[in-house]
Image (cartoon, helix red, strand yellow):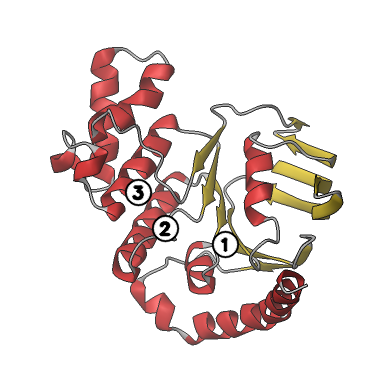
Amino acid sequence: MPILEVHRLDKSFTADDEKITVLDGLSLSIEDGDFVSIVGPTGCGKSTFLHIVGGFESKTGGELRFNERPLGPPGPDRGMMFQDHSLFPWLTAFGNVCWPLEMKGLAKAKRTEMAHKYLDLVHLARYADLYPEQLSGGMKQRVALARLLALDPQMFLMDEPFGALDSQTRELLQEELQAIWRSRRKTVLFVTHDIDEAIYLGTRLIVFTARPGRVKADIGIRAEERTASFRKSPEFFTMRSRVWDLLRDEVLKARALEER
């Protein structure tokens, strides 16, 4: 049974007396346990779609159902991770991971145990007492990931969470995220501009059209274990070529829209 069903989703707004349609009749179905990578040209509505699913932005039309019920406001069933880590600067790494556990009403001893567990899972146990300003960009994103795990939502909504990181840190975090997903099998919607990242992480890859965003392609990817060698395999390069062929025309359309 799908965990998320989207039927003819529309999103538009008015700017300078002009109606701008961001999403137009977008429909898709997400199964429980899917890791869905979403790629598309700049401005196609990928992040807007994620924010609507998270309950942070309203839709203009259409229907979304989560666990067979109309999608509600933001809640602990859907956890968001942004490109900006969004950590509380006045809290340590430990305090940031404790925060959702405190919101859940867990006893202090249990919060402490679980926060240390999640920091250890992202290899930050020794940095628990440091504040965000004392951490590197990659470390901040690891803390944000640990906080998301502590929230324990049914669905992870991840909006280019590794986009601002250097390539080496990014690949290591991709491997960690993939390992965590395999152990927990949470449903993930992962927006990215990086085709390689989308293929490496996803069990499905959805290509959006240029604005207004619609689903151009929905591609299944074998859920075999993603080792470093997967990035060098013929299957990976074949998939990359296929996705770029689908995406290239949409990128050119998006560029033409920008130049009008």
Q: Which residue is mark 2?
A: 162
Q: Are marks 2 and 1 in contact (CB under 8 Å)?
A: no
Could you tell me residue 15's position as x and y percent?
A: 78, 49
Would residue 108 be seen by someone viewing this image from the given angle? yes
Nearest to the eye among marks 2 and 1: give it.
2
Q: Earlier in the sequence, mark 3 or mark 1?
A: 3
Q: Nearer the viewer, residue 193 or 63?
A: 193
Q: Residue at x 53, y 82 (%)?
A: 235
State the separation of the CA atoms marked 2 and 3. 8 Å
Could you tell me residue 118's position as x and y percent?
A: 29, 37
Residue that sits furthest to the left in the current view? 126
Q: Nearer the viewer, residue 144 or 60?
A: 60
Q: Earlier in the sequence, mark 2 or mark 3?
A: 3
Q: Nearer the viewer, residue 260 or 56?
A: 260
Q: Secondary structure at mark 2?
A: loop
Which quadrant of the figure contains the C terminus? bottom right
Could you tell me residue 192's position as x and y percent?
A: 54, 62
Which mark, by number, is residue 135?
none
Q: Are marks 2 and 3 in contact (CB under 8 Å)?
A: yes
In the displayed structure, does residue 116 sit left or right of residue 75?
Answer: left
Q: Which residue is mark 1?
A: 203
Q: Secondary structure at mark 3?
A: helix
Q: Which residue is mark 3?
A: 141
Please tell me how crowded label 1 is: few (under 14), some (14-19), or many (20+) other residues with Cα within 10 Å: some
